[in-house]
Amino acid sequence: MNRFSLYLITCFIANILFVSTTNSQFLGLPVWPLVTGFEQSGPTQDLTSTTLHQYVIWNSSTPIAMDIPSGSSNKVGPSHAGVNECGELVFFTLHNGDFNAATAELNLYDAGGNQIIVTGGEMNASAGDDEIQVVLRPGSVNQWFFIYNLAPSSYPSTSPGYQASYLAYSLVEVMGTTAQYISDGSGPIKDRLLDVGGTNYQYFPGKATSASSFVGNHDIYAQRRDQAFGSTVISSTFEVDKFVIDTSKTIAHAATSSTVSSYSWSLMAAGSPIELDPNSNQLLVMARSQNNNQQEAYLFDVSSPTAFAALPTTIKFSELLIDFDSTISVSGSLSQYHAPMEFDISTGTGFDWLRNMERKIVGVEFSPSGDYLYFCGGGYQSSGNSNLSYLGQIDLTTSGPNYITRLQVQTSDPLNSYNSTTGTGPTWSSSNYTNLWLFHPTAKIQTCYDGNMYFTKGRSSDLFVLPDPDALMPINLTPHDIDFSTPSIPNISTNGYANNMPDQIDGYDYFDCGGSTSTAEHESTTIAIELGPVPANDRLQIKLDSKVRAEYGTLQIVDLTGKLLFTEAFIPQIGTSSHDINVSTLGSGVYLLTIECHTNSGIEHKTIRFIKQ
C-alpha cells in the first residue's frame, strides 16, 4: 500500500527539562507534522508517496526516527498541527489533493496517522492553500478553529494555488478518532465565509495568526486581492484584513489596512506568504514576481490599531544593499554595499548574476527577536533551467527601506555550471530531467521551538539548520551548497522530499497548561516536581513537594501520541516525598509524566516532560 511520510518533529534543546512554565525562548509549535513526497507531488498536485509516517524527535544526540504503523492516506501536501494546551499533538491536517471544488477536502488524522471522521463532512478547503491556520479556541481544550481558502470553482494555470479565493473557517471539536462541528444560531460552523461589512472578498493563500491581540486572543491577517475566478488578471492594489478570534464561536472582522499600490503578475497568488514577527509587532506581506526588479514585500507596523492604519514600508528586493564584506567596484562605484539592480548594467564584476536575485523569492521568516527577516529562493531567469538561489538575512535594525542584507548563494548544480552573467544553470528539457534532480534551490524557511531556524531545498530530503538566527549570518557570495550543520547541531534528514513545513503562531506559548479543563480538575499551583537524572536512564527519580492534603494520587507516563505506558497509585504526603520509577522498557524519546492528587475539592494535576536517553 502506498503511504506518505509523516514526520512529527519535536523541537527542544539538549538537557533542558520542559515543565509547564516554559522558558519564553521556547515558543512556537513543539511538534511538526511533516509530510514528504516526490517533486511532482508538490503542494497542489494529486500524487502519492511510498514512504511510511515517522516521528522525528529532536534530542541531545542524533534525532530519533520512529515509524508510525498506521497511515490511511498516501496524499502529499502541506500539513498543519493541532496541539492542545499542553503542546501535545492531537491531530494533523492533510488535503485529499483534489482540485475539483466539489470533491476537495481537508482531512484530519490523529497522531498515529488514522483518519478522524468529522460528522457533517470534511472541510471544503483549496488544495493550493499552504498556510491553513489551526488555532485552539480560547477557553476550550478540544475545539479548534480552521481558517483556509475555500476551494475555488475555477482557477488559472491548471492549479488552484494560483487563484485568490474566498476565506472560510470552521470550528471543530475533536474527540479521539471522531470530530464534529460546533453549532451556533446559524447552524454548524463549517465552511463559513469571512466577510468585511457583509461582503465576501477574495484572498491569497498567505495568512498569519498573532500570539496576542488588542481586542481578542488572536488576530488573523490575510491579503485581499481581486481576481476573477479562472482569470490570470490580478488586481495591482491590495488591502490586509484583520479578523479576531476570542472565546466566542465566530470569527469577526476587526480592521482593514490602507489600500496599498502594488503590481500585478498572473501567478502571484502562490508563493506570497504573510508572516508575523514573534512579538506580533511587524507583519510582512509578500507579492511574488518573476519580472526583473519588480518583486516587493510590505512591512506593516501592527503594534497598535493606529499603526496598522498607516501605509507599510515597501521593501524592494532589487534595491536592498547587499553586504560584500569588503569594498568592490560596480560601474565605477566603490562601496561595501551594492543593490542587485546595479548589476543590470554592469559586467565583469564576478557577481553579475545578482541582477536576478529578486526574481521568484518564495520563503520569508522573521528571526525570534524580529530584528532580521530571512528569505529563500530567487534567482529565476528562464523556465526549464536551474539557477542560483539565495538565503538572505535582511537587517531590519539598519536604515530602511534599503536595508543592509547578508547573503549565502546556493549553487545551480553540483558542477557549478551556471552562466556567470545571469546565474542560469543547466537545462533539463532535453536531458530526461536528469538536471532537474540535481537542482536544489532554497525554498521554505521556518523558526523552530529549539531557537534555530530550518530551511528546505527543492528535491532534497533534509531540513537544513540555521543556528543562532538572531546573530549576523555569515556572508558567502561564492555559489556553493549552503549547509550550516555541525555534528552537535545537525540537519534533520527525512526519507522523502521535504516540500513544506507547517505554519505556526510565531511567538505563541503552546505549553500553557494553566487553563481549567473542568470545574473539578485544574492545573495545580500547590504541587512542585523535580525529576532526575536529565536525561533519564533506566530509573526516573521523582521529588514531589505538595502543599495539599489528598486522599490518593496516581503517577502516569504517556508518549506524545497520548498512549498510556505506565500508571502507579500512591498516597500523597504534605511536604516532600520521593518516588523511583523503572523506565528501562521505554525507548529513547520524549514522554509526559502526569501526577494527579485527588482531594476533597477535586483533582489537582501536574504534567512535566522528560527525556529518556
Image: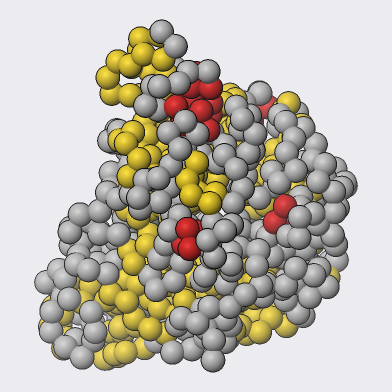
* Quarter of the picture holding the N terminus: bottom right
Nearest the viewer among 238 and 145 is: 238
Q: Position of residue 211 (x, y in %)?
A: 51, 48
For the point 74% across and 47% down, the residue is 203
Choose between 262 and 260: the one closer to the eye. 262
Give the residue displayed 66% in from the left and 23% down from the top: 310
**x, y (%) of residue 271?**
61, 48
Viewer can see residue 323: yes
Query: Residue at image x 45%, y 82%?
Result: 52
Observer able to see residue 599: no
Q: Quadrant of residue 60?
A: bottom left
**What residue occupies the far front of the structure in this picture?**
430
Q: Which residue is located at x 33 percent, y 16 percent?
A: 328
**In the image shown, does 187 or 281 lie closer to the viewer?**
281
> Is residue 381 placed above or below 18 in the rendered structure?
above
- Image height of 483 relative to 113, above or below: above
What sort of colour scheme is used for the picture?
A: secondary structure
Q: How far across and down, in percent of the image, does residue 123 sit?
A: 73, 71
The quadrant of the image that shows the C terminus is bottom left
How many numbered marks are there? 0
Specify whether 492 is left or right of 426.
Answer: left
Q: Position of residue 311 (x, y in %)?
A: 66, 23
Q: Would you identify the image quadrant in which residue 193 lies? A: bottom right
**Rendered view: 494 above or below 286:** below
